[in-house]
Image: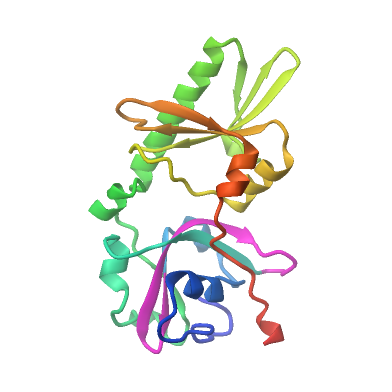
């Protein structure tokens, strides 16, 4: 992943925290179609990898034509990609560019945080969707899978005049910690019929818990910001 101007790592200084580094450098980049399919990115400065990120989504940058914002989870010690790249030499493919994709083969550290390989993640998602759809159907709701429409929720459920827009998040482990795209957060902020249902231990002993939009907005932590470098 490279920016179009080949700038160095923006605003890097020794002693920055992970949050400060992410905040200073997750601005608006000119990205190709490949960005939508990548899982990991690394950030380098002065020939050394300084940070690694697991990508959750790539969204259009607000008010910036042809630019994108990458949302994701900053990796730390114990994550396979962090341990493999951070504080080591930047891959030769970076050249003068500060951002690059890296291979996304899953490892033990990914499983420990419940972000497995794409095939396993898909299995967890399907099980969670089936589990929640079944619960609502048993309760008399008419259930429609709209997950492919990218509308900010996965299930539209109706029961007489009642309408529910349900976002489903499936996890293979017991910890209810999930990633949200900008589109999902927008739905949580504006749709009165929206709710999140998290299914933990989806592949073994699935249990679900529902969260309202107010709770999601209160707990959500921003991991990407627009950086207008034209004003620097």
> Is residue 1 visible in the rendered structure shown here?
no
Along the line of sight, the residue nearer the viewer: 26 or 151: 26
The C terminus: image quadrant = bottom right
Percent across and percent down for residue 98 are 46, 80
Examine the image and state in which quarter residue 221 appears: bottom right
> Is residue 201 visible in the rendered structure shown here?
yes
Percent across and percent down for residue 151 are 66, 40
Residue 45 magenta-highlighted: yes
The residue under the point 38% across, 78% down is 50
Examine the image and state in which quarter residue 66 appears: bottom right
Give above or below for 52 relative to 193: below
The residue under the point 65% across, 82% down is 229
Question: For this view, does 65 lie left or right of residue 6?
Answer: right
Percent across and percent down for residue 75 are 37, 63
Farthest-out residue, left: 108
Point out the stretch of residues depicted in magenta.
42-66
The residue under the point 61% across, 33% down is 195
């Amino acid at each position: 992943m490279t920016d179009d101007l080949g700038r160095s790592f923006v605003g890097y200084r020794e002693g920055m925290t992970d949050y400060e580094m992410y905040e200073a450098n997750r601005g608006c980049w000119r990205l190709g179609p490949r960005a939508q399919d990548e899982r990991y990115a690394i950030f380098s400065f002065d020939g050394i990898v300084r940070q690694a990120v697991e990508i959750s989504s790539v969204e259009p940058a607000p008010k910036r034509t042809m630019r994108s914002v990458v949302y994701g989870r900053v990796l730390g010690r114990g994550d396979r990609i962090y341990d493999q790249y951070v504080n080591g030499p930047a891959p030769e493919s970076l050249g003068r560019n500060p951002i690059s994709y890296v291979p996304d083969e899953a490892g033990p550290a990914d499983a420990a945080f419940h972000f497995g390989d794409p095939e396993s993640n898909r299995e967890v998602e399907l099980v969670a969707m089936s589990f929640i759809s079944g619960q609502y159907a048993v309760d008399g709701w008419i259930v429609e899978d709209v997950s492919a429409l990218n509308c900010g929720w996965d299930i539209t459920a109706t029961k007489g005049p009642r309408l529910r827009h349900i976002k489903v998040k499936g996890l293979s482990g017991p910890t209810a910690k999930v990633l949200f795209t900008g589109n999902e957060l927008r739905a949580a902020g504006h749709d009165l019929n929206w709710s999140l249902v998290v299914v933990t231990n989806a592949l073994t002993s699935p249990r679900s818990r529902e969260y309202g939009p107010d709770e999601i907005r209160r707990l959500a932590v921003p991991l990407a910001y627009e950086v207008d470098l034209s004003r620097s």
